[in-house]
Amino acid sequence: MKFLAFIAAATLAMSPAFAQSNSPAGLWKNIDDETGKPKALIRITESNGVLTGQIEKLFREANEEQNPKCEKCDGARKDQPIVGMTILSNLKKDGDEYAGGEILDPNNGKTYKSKLHLTDGGKKLSVRGYIGVPMLGRSQTWVRQE
């Protein structure tokens, strides 16, 4: 009987972790596709089936501004702090991936179409930003932090 109770408790304890690995919601470290170095921590949240991603922390050198402003951004994002900025928006589930949304590159202020999908059992996220068609873009691998 104790063994059965242990199995039930273990199964319940694993459920949140399993559910998390099936969704991109959570905290991610993005890895620069050009330098291979970590750039930021991004918190992805899901509300009504729509993903949004916000920068929580930047990985910067000690001599660099720790919370720079998005000088190259347009509109409401112009000259706003990058930490706290929403960079992923309107991504919706489409089969095994999330698509139809946008991603902002705060380095150049440009917004691109975006799609993403989980890899490595939910431990990694392949994020693609592109213009027009997905072939014309760049991809980054983000690593789950929680």
Image (spheres, rainbow, N blue to C red):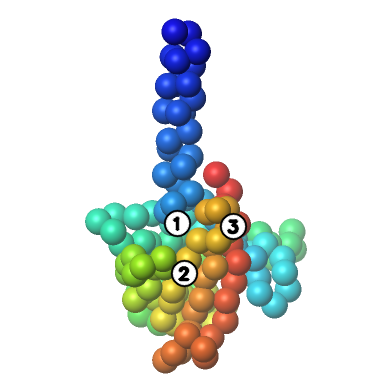
- What is the total number of numbered labels drawn onto the structure image? 3
Where's residue 5, x and y in %?
A: 44, 14
Measuring 25% from the left and 56% from the top, which residue is drawn there? 48
Quarter location, residue 40: bottom right
Q: Which residue is mark 1?
A: 24
Q: Nearer the viewer, mark 1 or mark 3?
A: 3
Sequence-first tag of 1 and 3: 1
Answer above or below: position of 5 versus 78. Answer: above
Quarter location, residue 139: bottom right
Quarter location, residue 61: bottom right
Element type at mark 2: strand
Badge 1: how crowded within 10 Å, few (<14), some, or many (20+)? many
Which quarter of the rendered picture does the C terminus lie within?
Answer: top right
From where the camera sits, is residue 16 visible? yes
Measuring 67% from the left and 62% from the top, which residue is drawn there? 38
- At label 1, the amino acid type is Pro
- At label 2, the amino acid type is Leu
Q: Nearer the viewer, mark 3 or mark 2?
A: 3
Q: Which residue is mark 3?
A: 120
- Would you say the residues marked 1 and 2 are in contact, meaning their CB atoms lie under 8 Å apart? yes
User: Position of 75 compared to 116: left or right?
Assistant: left
From where the camera sits, is residue 67 visible? no
User: Position of 96 compared to 118: left or right?
Assistant: left
Q: Which residue is mark 2?
A: 116
Q: CA distance from mark 1 to mark 3?
A: 12 Å
Where's residue 93, x and y in %?
A: 34, 65
Where's residue 84, x and y in %?
A: 45, 58
Q: CA distance from mark 3 to mark 2?
A: 13 Å
Answer above or below: position of 33 versus 46. Answer: below
Answer above or below: position of 7 versus 142. Answer: above
